[in-house]
Structure formats: C-alpha cells, structure tokens
Image (cartoon, helix red, strand yellow):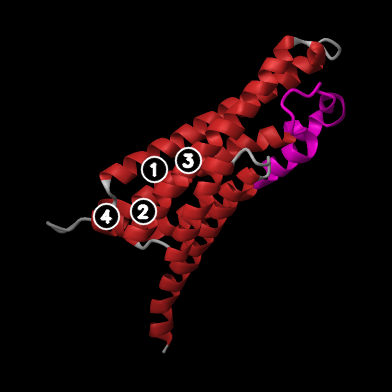
Amino acid sequence: MPPGVTTQPASLTGAHLRTPQAAAVAGIVFSILMMSALVLLRLSVPDNPLEPGAWLGTDSNRVAIALNLVPFAGIAFLWFIGVLRARLGEREDRFFATVFLGSGLLFLAMLFVAAGTAGAVIMAYSAHAEAIPQSATFSLARALSYGIMNVYAVKVAGVFMITTSTIVIYTAIAARWIAYLGYALAVLLIFGGALTDWTFIVFPLWILLLSGDILIDDLRRTATPEASERS
C-alpha cells in the first residue's frame, strides 16, 4: 500500500450508508414481533390481573409463544436504539440522548422482567397444575407482571417516544409529522395507558411508522444518484 493511503475512510463511509437501513429494519422487526406478542397475550389472558388463571389450562401454549417472541423483539429494539444513535452522530444533544438511551434500556429491562415473570408462572403450572392457580404466589406473579407492563413500562415507553420525537424534530432524521404524532401518542401512554390493555400497542405501531419513514427516505437517497447516472 502506498504511503499515506488508508482504507479507513471508505469503511467508515460504508458503515454510515448502511446505518439508516439497519435502524429501519431493526425497528420494523421489533414492531412486528412486539405487536404479534401483544395480540397473542391480549387474546389469551384476561384483563383482570387478579383473575383465577383459567387461561393456564386452555391458552398457556399461545401465551408461551408470545413470551418466546419477546427476547427477539427486545434484541431488535436494542439494535434499533444503537443504530439510530449512530445515525445521529455528532448532531445528538447530550441531554436528550441520555434520556433516549436510558428510557429505551429501562423499557427493555421492564419488558424482560414482565415476560420472565409470566414465563415462570407457566413453567410452575406445568409442574403443579392443580396448586398454582389457587396459590398466593400465582396472584403475586400475575399482578407483578401486569403492573410492570401496564403501569411502569407503558409510561417509560411514552418518555422514549417524547425524546425520540424531539430528536426527530431537531435532527430531521424523519418526517416532522411523525414526531408530532409521537408527542400525542406519548401523552396517551403516560396519562391514559391504563384505560385499556390495547393502548400499549400504539408504541410498536409508532416505531413501525418511524422506521418505515426512515427506510423509505434512505432508499430514496440511495436511488437518486443511480437515477442521475442513468440519465
């Protein structure tokens, strides 16, 4: 290699060009997996956290499938956060970047704890089918899992949407109307998340919308130079 010549800038440029698509794909994967898990859970488990657990005998397999989707959704969400921060680069504000990262990781931790608690109930039921639904341990685990997701995680998701929407407005990484929609949906999650168990589904839907806009914008930017060369 001649003196003074290095391949590092080319590799950095290539990584920069792949970042938007990686963020969009990760966000789309998270949204699809999370919505699938939520739909399965809402159709299988009653809204009342103090219900007697009849679903353990009829719908435990469907609940187990939903819980098995959660780790993959979490990995995709973590990837989404990482590559989105990489796209922001030097433009990100330290304050909003800290809240963005912190709320995202906190949401992910709560999601895993709630899913792990529900999974432990199913495993215990497979070993003690008659005793578990009538035990105080089942009631505690059921209420704990419900409270983490529907009281705490849903509000942290709202904070994540607010900070992400603010970053979108100041950095123009996506359409501004998506950010304004994110503010409105975040208020719904923070102050009205307990209205119905289906309210939380707006979070992965908004991530899907944001990711789709990022992907379309990146594909458009990629296709523009090619169109110029052809013409």
User: Neighbour class for label 4 at 10 Å: few (<14), some, many (≥20)?
Assistant: few
**Spatial separation of the CA atoms under disc 1 and disc 4:** 14 Å
Which residue bears the numbered disc 4? 91
Kind of residue at disc 3: Leu
Residue visible at 45% across and 75% down in the picture: 223
Point out the stretch of residues depicted in magenta. 35-64
Q: Secondary structure at mark 4?
A: helix
- Disc 3 or 2, which lies upstream in sequence? 3
CB within 8 Å, label 3 to label 4: no
Residue visible at 43% across and 82% down in the picture: 227
Which residue bears the numbered disc 3? 78
Kind of residue at disc 4: Arg
Which residue bears the numbered disc 1? 100
CB within 8 Å, label 2 to label 1: yes
Mark nearest the camera among 3 and 1 is: 1
Which residue bears the numbered disc 2? 167
**Spatial separation of the CA atoms under disc 3 and disc 2:** 17 Å
Q: Secondary structure at mark 3?
A: helix
